[in-house]
Image (cartoon, rainbow, N blue to C red):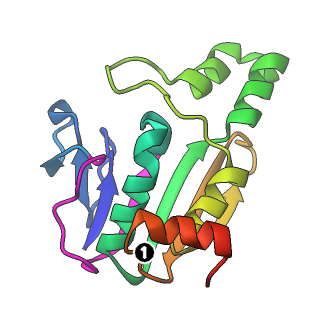
């Protein structure tokens, strides 16, 4: 089973496309900041493509824990998100004369109630967090479109609780 969380209008064939907005006609209407309706170790792949920046930071760790719970060992996560510092600098310098575009990369397009960016994404902070959550992670800034990153993670171990995450961060257990 493969999940496309926060799919919006972009459905991926072969994936269960999930979104909170019923107007985009997802396969499943659901709030991904809540518990996902899947058994432990039952999903092989999860994609969040330009989604995580639309979710308040207080929900990030619970979402990563939930993804860890439902992913099979060696299951894959793929995330794409705008790098805040790059977007802000592109706005400040008016890169390619596209200031309005760069502003949207910071704040979202704001076309719908959920089309606002509410979290600043920074790979230098996100990657260690995901590693502490049991994922092996690689990132790839996109050439030519040097304002967003595609992150790929692989579930290496189960994380049982928030305490496990804190223990990993403090004592660097493997």
**Side (left or right) of 139 relative to 56:** right
Mark 1 lies on residue = 159
Give the residue displayed 38% in from the left and 17% down from the top.
Answer: 111
Give the residue displayed 43% in from the left and 60% down from the top.
Answer: 64
Q: Examine the structure image and report whether residue 67 is included in the region drawn in magenta.
A: no
Q: Examine the structure image and report whether residue 35 is included in the region drawn in magenta.
A: yes
Question: Whole-percent x and y of residue 130?
Answer: 56, 64
Q: Does 64 appear above or below 44?
A: above
Give the residue displayed 49% in from the left and 29% down from the top.
Answer: 118
Q: Does 62 appear above or below 113?
A: below
**Side (left or right) of 116 relative to 35:** right
Q: Does 103 appear above or below 45?
A: above
> In the structure shown, which secondary structural element does the residue marked by tag 1 occupy?
loop
Question: Whole-percent x and y of residue 154?
Answer: 51, 76
User: Number of numbered discs present?
Assistant: 1
Question: Whole-percent x and y of residue 124?
Answer: 73, 53
């Amino acid at each position: 089973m493969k999940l496309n969380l926060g799919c919006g209008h972009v459905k991926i064939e072969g994936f269960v496309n999930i979104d909170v907005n019923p107007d985009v006609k997802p396969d499943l209407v659901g709030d991904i900041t809540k518990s996902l309706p899947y058994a432990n170790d039952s999903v092989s792949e999860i994609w969040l493509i330009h989604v995580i920046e639309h979710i308040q930071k207080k929900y990030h760790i619970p979402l990563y824990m939930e993804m860890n719970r439902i992913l099979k060992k060696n299951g894959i996560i793929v995330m794409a998100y705008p790098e805040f510092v790059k977007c802000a600098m592109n706005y400040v310098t008016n890169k390619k004369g596209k200031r309005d575009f760069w502003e949207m990369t910071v704040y979202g397009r704001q076309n719908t109630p959920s089309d606002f960016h509410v979290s600043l994404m920074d790979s230098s902070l996100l990657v260690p967090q995901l590693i502490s959550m049991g994922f092996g992670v690689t990132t790839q800034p996109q050439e030519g479109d040097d304002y967003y990153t595609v992150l790929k993670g692989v579930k290496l171990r189960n994380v049982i609780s928030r305490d496990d995450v804190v223990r990993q961060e403090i004592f660097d257990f493997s």
